[in-house]
Image (cartoon, grey):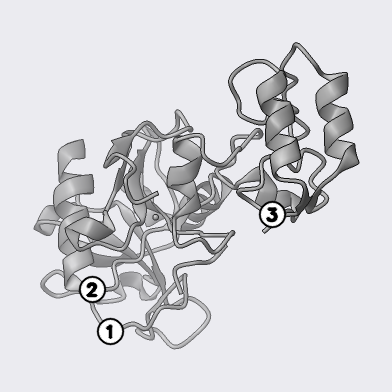
Amino acid sequence: MKQLLSRLSVASAVAVGSSALAQDAVQWRVEDGGNGHWYAVHQQTSPLGWDAAMQFAQSIGGYLSTLASATEDSWVRTRVVTPMGIPPITSGPWLGATCEGTTWGNWRWVTGEPWVYSAWAGGEPNNGGGQEHYVQMYQGQNLSWNDNQLDGRGTTFSAIIEWSADCNADGIVDYGQILTGELEDTNANNIPDCCEAGTACGCSADISGNGTVDAVDLAAVLSSWGNAPTGKVNADVNRDGIVDAIDLAEVLGAWGACP
């Protein structure tokens, strides 16, 4: 479902890595009754189409938000959208729902979640003009929903981004672990390097990324002694800014196959 592509103690709001976002991301924490996902509003000064919004969301490791329950919808309105003070124009922000490619009105979430909840504004959806196949919140009616055309008729300037990917299946959303530095993301695309490389996450002593802590990793530490190289091959295992005896001990202590 939402794990397309939570550390639950992560702070509820942490700065997003992309300056194109209009706010800090906010986590709907599991301990607060949420799903552990992260949400933020992307807002710009020029019109934003649904497809462009979706592409932007994917480029930063997320997707357009899927508000699949009344509880999630209410939380996002209150904690994510309303604090932004988005101008009260008649449309936006975009959500991750569409009926494109099928019979109009056969709405679906981009994540494949069941369509069991909706919050349409009065008189919506109405397929005005015969091409309204995309869903957005409706600023003119207290953030209830509206169907709109692909380009938003030039009146949509924002979208809600959601992150839920857990590529290492540890029960914690990757996005939060990247923000806290627990998982490395050297190319800043909000996808952990270990997942992109196809190697075990949480096995920092595996410097070479071959799934085993072995002589290759030992050699990397010894050859980098006294400095901290950057990038995916980083012998500074404990990330304290220097390759030293602590990193050597980490490698020796984790010797063998990664868990």
The tag earlier along the polypeptide, 3 or 2, is 2
In the depicted view, which residue is nearer to us: 216 or 253?
A: 253
Q: Position of residue 94 (x, y in %)?
A: 35, 56
In the depicted view, which residue is nearer to us: 5 or 138?
A: 5
* Amino acid type of the residue that numbered disc 2 sits on in the rendered structure: Ser
| Residue occupying image coordinates x 70% and y 51% | 196
Question: Do the residues under discs 2 and 1 have CB atoms within 8 angstroms?
Answer: yes
* Amino acid type of the residue that numbered disc 3 sits on in the rendered structure: Ala
Q: Residues within 10 Å of mark 2 (few under 14, many from 20)?
A: some
Q: Residues within 10 Å of mark 3 (few under 14, many from 20)?
A: some
**From mark 2 to mark 1, how far is it between C-alphas?**
8 Å
In the depicted view, which residue is nearer to us: 56 or 223?
A: 223
| Residue occupying image coordinates x 15% and y 45% | 82
Residue identifier under label 2? 69
Q: Residue 105 lies in what quarter of the image?
A: bottom left
Residue identifier under label 3? 200
Q: Position of residue 18 (x, y in %)?
A: 48, 33
Is 26 left, or right, of 139 in this rendering? right
* Amino acid type of the residue that numbered disc 1 sits on in the rendered structure: Val
Residue identifier under label 1? 116
Q: In the displayed structure, would residue 222 be above or below residue 198?
A: above
Q: Residue 228 lies in what quarter of the image?
A: top right
